[in-house]
Image (cartoon, rainbow, N blue to C red):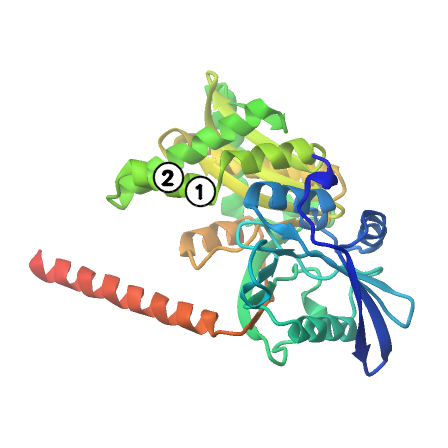
Amino acid sequence: MSHRQTQQHEPREWDVRTGDGQVRAMSPVPRETWARVLAADPGAMAFHLPEWVDCLCAVGGWQDVGRLYRTGEGRELVLPMVCRPARPHPLAVRASFPPGWGTGGILAPGGVRPHEVELVLADLAADQALRTSVRPSFRAAHAWPSPAPGFVSVPRTVHVLDLDGGMDAIWSQRWPKNTRRNMRTAERRAEKAGLIVETGSSPELVEDFYDLYLRWLDRRARERHLPPAVARSRGKRAEPLAKFHAIAAALPGTCRILVATVEGRPVAATIVLLRGDVCVYWRGYSDKQTANPLRANQLLQLRSIEQACDLGCRYYEMGESGGVASLKESKTRLGGEERPLTEYRLERVPLTRLQSRMDDIRGAVKHRFSEWGRVGG
């Protein structure tokens, strides 16, 4: 996918006045500058690649509105960001990045500094839009203020496994006894069952992964007593097949799909994203009935972590758990430590507060129905 295919607005430049002098800003970001700053930021992740934004725009229907800032100190800052196109400016929705597309934030040589974060947030606040959201990665969280004046702060947490010292240190220092036992059991059962793990980014592996995703949707529909067709339709809109084909094709060395098969049938699949010293566990699905007895999910985690160590990664980022206790527990068993970060939202209408209120109402309704069910039973 060429970046020329990415929707972009007309280039523009403007001045950002700060207490430290004048800062020159421009959008979109020239690709050569983006690449230079990306290479100089030790905390840059796969999500910050220009090719990632290309996929986001091509598949998600967004527009590249990333910003470049040149400070009086001679530093260059890059904020990868996208916007919904064809909307009047007061209704613009901008994100770095939208849900389902990872973390964004500011790139800078050596990592962004707190006063640089402040100047970028001030510039975003001066530009009227319905909503602007920025969710930096755990690597840069220390430089971001909490709270930020004028912004709604949404606390988030990711789990991160420290890979320092490689697999020897992980086995001996970071995995509890139960995890070590489960990993050894997974290897024994895989060998006995003839389970094979294939790694790559081919279209065939994308299709295997997506087939497991659809089967996962079907199982969730049965558990929640929803029509399978409705669940599949919603799931395909949220996670279209084209999204994974685009990322695998655009980032063959970064996107790695691991598929576990038994007698040629996929039973579990994982997608990890490797860039710099961070490996991100991005997606994972399985055929529960077959995968669980074989511990196929644990085996894929083991193989993913082993590959990350072999490639010299320093961190294995497992993402957010979305309040699901079982996910949080499984990441903790894998040695993941909680790393807090904050999402920053600038809103002209209190959308976050309204959404929170709606979530409370839905929760209360569900609780009331469950109470009625117990009384009626």
**Residue placed at 69% from the left, 53% from the top?**
9
**Residue placed at 59% from the left, 65% from the top?**
89
User: Residue 295, relative to residue 105: is it above or below?
Assistant: above
**Residue placed at 54% from the left, 65% from the top?**
91
User: Residue 354, relative to residue 170: is it above or below?
Assistant: below
Q: Real-space Cα distance between discs 1 and 2?
A: 6 Å
Tell me whether the residue at label 1 lies in contact with that at label 2, contact meaning CB atoms closer than 8 angstroms: yes
**Residue placed at 68% from the left, 61% from the top?**
105
User: Residue 16, relative to residue 253: is it above or below?
Assistant: below
The residue wearing badge 1 is: 237
Q: Is residue 359 left or right of residue 32?
A: left
Secondary structure under badge 1? helix
Rate crowding at label 1 as few (under 14), some (14 to 19) or many (20 or more) other CA atoms within 10 Å.
few
Quadrant in which the C terminus is drawn: bottom left
The residue closer to the viewer here, 20 or 40, is: 20
State the image quarter where residue 226 is shown: top left
- x%, y% of residue 159? 57, 56
How many numbered circles are shown? 2
Q: Is residue 211 left or right of residue 3?
A: left
Q: What amino acid type is highlighted by mark number 2?
A: Ser
Is residue 264 visible in this depiction of the protein?
yes
Residue 233's disc is: 2
The residue closer to the viewer here, 231 or 12, is: 12
The residue closer to the viewer here, 354 or 307, is: 354
Quadrant in which the N terminus is drawn: top right
- x%, y% of residue 232? 36, 37
Q: Is residue 77 left or right of residue 356?
A: right
Secondary structure under badge 2? helix
User: Residue 76, relative to residue 38: is it above or below?
Assistant: below
Q: What amino acid type is highlighted by mark number 1?
A: Arg
